[in-house]
Image: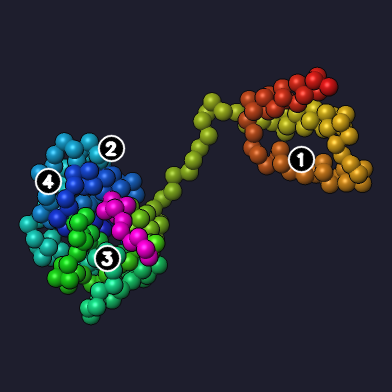
């Protein structure tokens, strides 16, 4: 499966901001291809580029066509997004059904204009219509929001490599010894106010305290702060 097989096609988009936001969404999930059909704004323009933020390369490499037929001529499977059911001889699918799509083929996700969506004539170029589940009393989604939902879902299907979050090198995890010293100070203060009662529940309460502090993955700085708090509480008495 290749991300290069997937195109996001905007049919007569009306707002520069939406075009830029769509480019940004495409790049968020490491896709490459943006296709525009008869955009209303001058393309590209400064507002589109500004809204795209770091995705100016997507804008610059995008393709523009004068009609839908030409835009989809090289695409194997066209999936048209629609908020409403169409009484046409076309298969309607939902997001989960995208798992059954052969992403080795050239896939195009087709989005209608912000004002009117896609007409039945435009839908006729599609292999499927795709519905994104929303509040039935408020179905309308912003163009870029629709695109980013689909982009994220498709990326998860074709197993876009996750980039794990890493701690800053400036943050040092607390050692077990530091946690034990802080915990001992906490327990000492709790003993002084007879917190652990009845006595028979003390072992279980201590176990719960250890579970809380050991699973928090505290930094050495956070341990120092907590130790200072517990020491101050002891002095107040």
Mark found first going from the N terminus, 1 or 4? 4
Which label belongs to residue 210? 1
Please name whichever residue, 189 or 217, is drawn nearer the observer in this view of the structure. 189
Please tell me whether residue 146 belongs to the stretch shown in magenta. yes
Q: Is residue 96 visible?
A: yes
SS class, disc 1: helix
> Residues under labels 2 and 4: Cα distance?
20 Å
Which badge, 1 or 2, comes first in the chain's sequence? 2
Q: Which mark is residue 41?
A: 4
> In front: mark 3 or mark 1?
3
> Image point 28% across, 76% down: which residue?
91
Circle count: 4
Q: Which stretch is magenta? A: 136-147
Earlier in the chain: of badge 2 and badge 4, it is 4
Q: Residue furthest bottom?
A: 89
N-terminal of the pair, mark 4 or mark 3, is 4
Q: Secondary structure at mark 2?
A: loop
**Numbered tag placed on residue 54 in the rendering:** 2
Residue 59, visible in the rendered structure = no
Q: Which mark is residue 82?
A: 3
């Amino acid at each position: 499966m290749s991300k290069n097989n997937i195109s996001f096609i905007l049919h007569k988009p009306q707002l520069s901001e939406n075009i830029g936001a769509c480019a940004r969404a495409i790049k968020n999930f490491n896709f490459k291809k943006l296709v525009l059909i008869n955009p209303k704004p001058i393309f590209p323009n400064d507002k589109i580029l500004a809204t795209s933020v770091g995705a100016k390369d997507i804008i610059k490499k995008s393709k523009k066509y004068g009609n839908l037929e030409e835009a989809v001529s090289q695409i194997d499977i066209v999936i048209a997004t629609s908020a409403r059911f169409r009484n046409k001889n076309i298969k309607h699918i939902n997001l989960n059904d995208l798992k059954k799509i052969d992403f080795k083929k050239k896939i195009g996700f087709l989005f209608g204009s912000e004002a009117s969506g896609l007409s039945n004539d435009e839908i006729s170029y599609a292999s499927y219509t795709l519905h994104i589940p929303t509040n039935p009393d408020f179905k309308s989604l912003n163009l870029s929001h629709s695109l980013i939902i689909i982009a994220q879902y498709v990326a998860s299907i074709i197993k876009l490599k996750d980039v794990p979050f890493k701690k800053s090198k400036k943050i040092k995890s607390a050692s077990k010894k530091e946690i034990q010293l802080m915990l001992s100070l906490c327990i000492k203060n709790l003993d002084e106010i007879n917190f652990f009662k009845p006595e028979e529940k003390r072992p279980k309460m201590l176990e719960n305290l250890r579970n809380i502090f050991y699973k928090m993955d505290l930094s050495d700085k956070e341990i120092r702060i907590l130790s200072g708090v517990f020491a101050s509480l002891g002095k107040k008495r």
